Image (tube, helix red, strand yellow):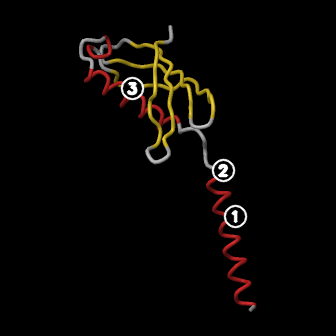
Amino acid sequence: MRKMTLHRINYVLLAVLLGATLGCSGRQPKPAVAQRIITKHFQRYAKKFPESSLGRAPVTSAEVQGIEEVHKHYLILTTALHQQDGQGMRARVALEKHVPGGWHVVAWERDE
């Protein structure tokens, strides 16, 4: 009987610790992860639309300048995009978190 009670207590403690660990995880991606996601998105965009300004001078890197959480799993990032020809532009990028797949770019617009 005593052995059964100790096993139950161990399972309850494990469940509480696991819940606390997962519940306290960050709701926003790290800046390095966000920069990688945005850079990859704009590189794919350049291949899809080669006649656009981003297609003629693809994005080489992105710099996250601000993060605004609209609601859980939905962010608006203010970014500075650096292009291959030395030019740059600012953009507002919306990221959404898909549970099995991670963060994805939903929309973007130039930020003048």
Residue drawn where x is 62% and y is 30% of the image: 69
Q: Which of 97/38 is in front?
A: 97
Q: Nearer the viewer, mark 2 or mark 1?
A: 1
User: Which residue is painted at 50% across and 45% down in the image?
Assistant: 99
Quick one: label 3 or label 2, which is nearer the N terminus?
2
CA separation in Å, label 3 and label 1? 41 Å
Instruction: Name the residue furthest bottom.
Output: 1
The span from disc 2 to disc 1 (Cα, nearest Å) is 12 Å
Label 1: element kind: helix
* Element carrying mark 3: strand
Q: Kindly check if marks 2 and 1 are in contact, taking CB atoms under 8 A apart as contact.
A: no
Q: In front: mark 3 or mark 2?
A: 2
Dot 3 or dot 1, earlier in sequence: 1
Neighbour class for label 2 at 10 Å: few (<14), some, many (≥20)?
Answer: few
**Position in image of residue 54 (x %, y %):** 32, 15
* Residue under pointer 2: 24
Amino acid tagged 2: Cys
The picture quadrant where one finds residue 51 is: top left
Disc assigned to residue 61: 3
Q: Which residue is mark 1?
A: 16
Residue 87 in picture, x, y percent from top left: 37, 11
Are the residues flagged by discs 3 and 1 in contact, CB closer than 8 Å? no
**84 and 36: which is toward the camera:** 36
In this picture, residue 107 sits left or right of residue 58: right
Query: Quadrant of residue 13 in the image?
Result: bottom right
